[in-house]
Image (cartoon, rainbow, N blue to C red):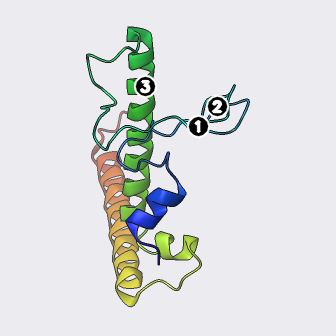
Amino acid sequence: MADAESIAQQNPGLDTKHDSAGAKHPATGGSGNPQTGEPFEHAKPDAHQRLDRKDERSHPNALEDAQRVEKLEKEAEKEHEDALRHPTAAAKAHGNKPSAGAVKDEKILDEEEEELRKKDEAKKQSAEALKPKHH
């Protein structure tokens, strides 16, 4: 397994802390100057903050970035909720056998859902039985 320093040397534009770092130019596919091909100088870590109020991005660009991040956060939250509902899904998605604990958790969740469904059905039947009958 490679250490962080060798990964940084192999990928000078890689910045794992800020997702907007290391942008690629669409024409060249690289992160350097498109005319000369020379790589840009990279700032030291934590030199740029994505939501810095003093940077030179326009307000619409900052809003667009904030909306993009909000969308990503909502997607991550949805994935997290799905993972909580289906404990074995992560292992299956990666081609692994789910752990015994995850299998038990999923079985318990299924039993609880079935019990809640039966209770809701019983409530509906009870409410239907208690309705006044008009002749």
Q: Are marks 2 and 1 in contact (CB under 8 Å)?
A: yes
- Mark 1 or mark 2, which is nearer the start of the sequence? 2
Can you identify the residue that label 2 sits on? Answer: 25
Query: From what the image shows, is residue 100 above or below residue 40?
Result: below
Q: Residue furthest top?
A: 59
Q: Residue at x 49, y 76 (%)?
A: 91
- Give the label, 2 or 3, closer to the camera: 2
Q: Position of residue 70 (x, y in %)?
A: 38, 32
Q: Are marks 3 and 1 in contact (CB under 8 Å)?
A: no
Q: Position of residue 25 (x, y in %)?
A: 64, 31
- Mark 1 or mark 3, which is nearer the start of the sequence? 1
What amino acid is found at the position of numbered circle 2 in the picture?
A: His
- Mark 3 or mark 2, which is nearer the start of the sequence? 2
Count of residue discs: 3
Can you identify the residue that label 1 sits on? Answer: 31
Q: Nearer the viewer, residue 42 or 73?
A: 42
Can you identify the residue that label 3 sits on? Answer: 65
